[in-house]
Image: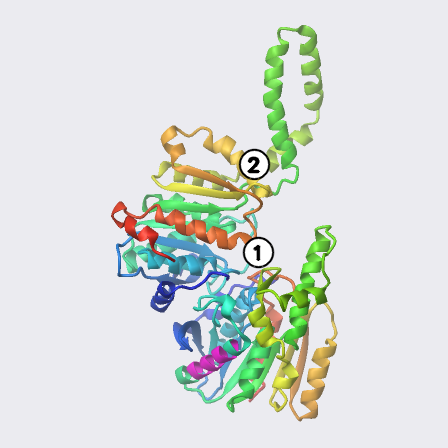
Amino acid sequence: MDWTETPAALARARAEEPVTFAGADGLLAGIFTPPASAGPAANRCVIFPARPRFGTRRLAVHAARALAAEGFAALRFDLRGHGESAGATVSVDRNQPPYGDDVAAAIGYLRETKFQCRFLLVGYCFDALSALDAFRSEADAIDGLFFAAAPVLVEPFTDLESVSSRIENRRGFSQRFGRSLRYPIKLISTVMPRLRRRKDPTEDARSRWCAQIPDSFESAFAALMQSRARALFLYGEDEPFYREFKLVERRLLADLDDAARRRVRIEVWPGAVHSLEREPAILDRVVSWAREFKPLTSNRSRHLSL
Amino acid sequence: MSNQSSSAFTLGLTEERRFFDSGDRPLYGVIRRGLRRDAPVVLFCNSFAADHDAKWRAEVIGAQVAAQHGYTTFSYHPRGHGDSAGNFADVTFEGLVEDAQSAACYALQKSGASRIVWIGIRFGALVAAEALRRRKDAVALAVWEPIHSAHAYFRELLRQNLYKDLALGRRPSMTADQMMERLGREPSLGVPGFELYRTFSESASAADLLQSLETWDGPTLVAQFRRREKLTRENIRLQNVLERRGARVTASVFVEKSNPNSQIPPQWFNEDLILRTAAWLDGLD
């Protein structure tokens, strides 16, 4: 909302085209921003699935126009049940299956109607989960994913701090256990409290449940990693969502080979990212991230003012 | 929160989404065509800033239902809002009224209607009232949880900062009056959800619903959605003033759990409110 509109962005606004396309629950509504014809083409279409497509601070509107001025095509659209799209209006939460089908429908529409072939997906919160989910069916067509501040566990885990610390404790326990083998008295003092703690199965079950990554996330993440796409995960260091994401780092990223790991970038900003106040900064980051996908021949346009 | 599917309202509905010009910029607009040829066009005038985002889904479904009742409707995003062009920081009250006037001209031209039913949502009630005061083609007015005074509204928005501080366990550093005073000196102040710019607050501070409606005596729907079950003092006063002038006023109360001045999720809509508005439209004949 606080973005300053440039003449180039205004020109792209004038070129925009409202579109509708078929989704699983009916028509989905969006705005297609064609790339500026002057200057080199980026040969990528950036898709912003959102609820609604403009959002409170119009992040996707400004980003779409700024990127279109630099040669990208862009589509921002309402996910089902939001804005002008058909579908039941439900409050989305972390246990709602993501709307990856809607994003895949957008890709199909853009491919057939706007002749776009390569895609970048940008999502924030639940919309990021929906963008990631699209990898399950359209991974080959997607070059990049910008994934900002989304929950990744099956339920908010208020005691996540304690789970993290227990994971750390377990690591510490292994080290202490190894050392204590040399000193039998220490062995007893190390192991006994541990055994006592394990007597509470309810607590362990709860922490396992709370720290569970949904299947939908795991399978979409696997599809992402099997693709050639690059992904940027953005979180704020002070927010609970980041503490959740640390589990993804440990469980899903740790096993990746070097080549796959190099395609994943994790950015952690000070403070919170999941806040309206940070949206202008996220917008800047979306634009700079998308520029990384421009063909090398069009480097010159990177210096264009937005 | 309703769970109604919007596709239930769109069966057989023709929707035309286009950009149209207001001043020197394109605004997003959508016509939903109803089957009644003699009916006035129903023009929605939505709220301001984050409230516009929060009430958009309600407007969309409201327009779809009205179209199902035979009325051609027009919805638009004013400058600096939604999909329209323009900087939010440059928005003024006069600019919003100009956009409403442009939307009215465009809606009449595209629908073939000669009369307008205005539906003003929250702050949009002030804009719709001011726009219809300057025209001669308005036949009815509905206001959804109207803002009666822009000045009081801004003060209420700033007061939200105090509540936010208290909720976070912080002692508020300023009173609402001090924040109002500060807004008069600084370019903008943050309120929950957006920046409130001095340019806008100064341009709109004199906006007053009763004043804009000083000559209005057409059919009016006052729809209140709040936690309270009775009409507010301001809505009663509006009803009384209009009725004394001979206007046919329908006042409806819809009890909502949340405070309309605080952030409401963007998918919010109230099905009763929408159906009541459609029934009121049907009763205008």
Identify residue for label 1. A91
What's the amino acid at mark 1? Ser
What's the amino acid at mark 2? Gln
Left of B8 or right of it: where is A75?
A: left
Left of A296 or right of it: where is A17?
A: right
Chain containing the residue with disc 2: A
Q: Position of residue A119 (x, y in %)?
A: 34, 50
Q: Which residues are magenta?
A: B96-107
Image height check: is A269 above or below A22?
above
Is A152 part of what is drawn in magenta?
A: no
Q: Position of residue B159 (x, y in %)?
A: 69, 64
Task: Please identify the quarter of the rendering in which residue A35 is found.
Answer: bottom left
Is B105 part of what is drawn in magenta?
A: yes
Q: Position of residue A77 (x, y in %)?
A: 43, 59
Disc 1: CA contacts within 10 A as few (<14), some (14-19) or many (>=20): some
Mark 1 and mark 2: span between their CA atoms?
Answer: 22 Å
Q: Can you see residue B255?
A: no
Identify residue for label 2. A212
